[in-house]
Image (cartoon, rainbow, N blue to C red):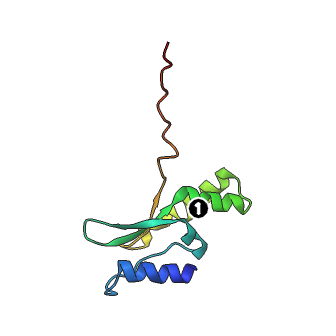
Amino acid sequence: MSKELREEIIEHACPDDEIKIVFLEPDCYDKTIKGLYWDNQNIPHIVYDRDMIINMHIHDGMTYDEAQEFIDYNTIRALPYMGVTAPILITPMQERISKPKRKKRK
């Protein structure tokens, strides 16, 4: 599945093979891909869900803090060295924003 997904993304994002898009490793992170983003220079970036990556590490036996530190140290810090097509990690906000409380009617 992962190889097929990567090939599909490459075909869609870089049809002319002018740009080499960068994926996070290991390829099990492909399950956390949320989509593609084109910056203001029309350069594609793969968008990953940071929380899903953390949850993958928790599932593999890390604590939340260990998983977060692992991602911050081994992935986030490496992004500037990945070139112009470096991936983007997002934290989806719909789970983090609380709904406003309704006032009860008298």
Q: Where 77 falls versus 100 (above or below)?
A: below
Quadrant placement of the N terminus: bottom right
Q: Closest to the observer: 68 or 97?
A: 97
Looking at the image, which residue is at 48% across and 21% down?
103
Q: Where 106 falls versus 25 (above or below)?
A: above
Image coords of residue 29 (percent x, y): 57, 69
Looking at the image, which residue is at 38% across and 73% down?
85
What is the tally of numbered marks visible in this picture? 1
Residue lying farthest to the right in this orientation: 61
Q: Closest to the observer: 87 or 83?
A: 87
Graded by Cα atoms within 10 Å as few (under 14), some (14 to 19) or many (20 or more), the crowding at tag 1 reads: many
Image coords of residue 51 (percent x, y): 56, 55
Q: Where 38 falls versus 6 (above or below)?
A: above
Q: Where 72 falls versus 101 (above or below)?
A: below
Residue lying farthest to the top in this orientation: 106
- The answer to whether residue 26 is seen in the rendering is no
Left-right relation of 24 to 45:
right
Image coords of residue 91 (percent x, y): 49, 53
- The answer to whether residue 5 is seen in the rendering is yes
Mark 1, secondary structure of its residue = helix
Image coords of residue 105 (percent x, y): 48, 16
Q: Based on the displayed image, in which of its 4 quarters is residue 52 positioned?
A: bottom right
Residue pointed to by mark 1 = 53
Residue type indicated by callout 1: Ile
